[in-house]
Amino acid sequence: MQAALKKELAALDRMTVDELRTKHYIVFGEENRSRHRDYLRKRIAWRLQALAEGGLSDRARQRAMEIANDADLRIRMPVATEPSPTATERTEVHVFHDGRDGRLPLPGTEIMRVYQGRTLRVTVLEDGFEYEGERYRSLTAVAKKVTGSHWNGMLFFGLRKEAA
């Protein structure tokens, strides 16, 4: 790559958006409405390199034109005048709440916690919890059984954040 071209490409990195738009007009001979700095910089750099070192071969240019002629391209999206009634009729949104705390795992899951050197294992049931063969209505009851004092069960077992 020529030294002059390298300097010109490096100068693009230091240009503002307005300067890049002016440079785009000089290089392409047409105005560009984009204000995206990287897009303008890359487009100008490509054009400068193509002018300096040669662009596409005639064969590649001809093939590109053949592909473009076969394609049905839209420049802009069609403007929707009013929402389609079928689109709103087809979609129903329902929120399912099973009444359980969102921090609790699904029934059948085993919650483990190490407390004073012992590994505690609590199984989540549909209607409570099971610890050492006994059923409890809440994790707080399990924590009280283990520690002998009142604890927040969710905090004791590390279930602090709402499930997603």
Image (tube, grey):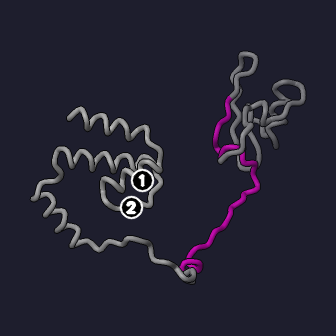
On screen, residue 75 above or below 7: below
On screen, residue 127 above or below 14: below
User: Extreme right residue here?
Assistant: 149
In the rendered image, which residue does mark 1 sit on?
A: 21
Query: Label 2 crowding class (10 Å Cα cut-off): few <14, some 14-19, many 20+?
Result: few
Image location of residue 157, percent across then percent down: 74, 32
22 vs 82, left or right, is: left
Of the numbered discs in the image, which one, if any, rests on residue 61? none
Image location of residue 8, percent across then percent down: 31, 39
Nearest to N terminus: mark 2 or mark 1 = 1
Name the quarter where the N terminus is drawn: top left
x 68%, y 34%: residue? 111
x 71%, y 44%: residue? 162
The one of 95 and 39 positioned closer to us in this rendering: 39
147 vs 11, left or right, is: right
Q: Which residues are magenta?
A: 87-112
In magenta stretch: residue 92 = yes
The one of 51 and 125 positioned closer to us in this rendering: 51
153 vs 150, left or right, is: left
x 71%, y 16%: residue? 117
Amino acid type at circle 1 is Arg
Image location of residue 161, percent across then percent down: 72, 40
Q: Secondary structure at mark 2?
A: loop
Instruction: Give the Cα distance between marks 2 and 1.
Output: 7 Å
Q: Which picture quadrant has residue 86?
A: bottom right
Amino acid type at circle 2 is Glu
Image location of residue 98, percent across then percent down: 72, 57
Decide whether the magenta segment is chiefly helix, strand or loop: loop
On screen, residue 157 above or below 162: above
In the rendered image, which residue does mark 2 sit on?
A: 31
The one of 164 and 157 positioned closer to us in this rendering: 164
Label 2 with label 1: CB-CB less than 8 Å: yes
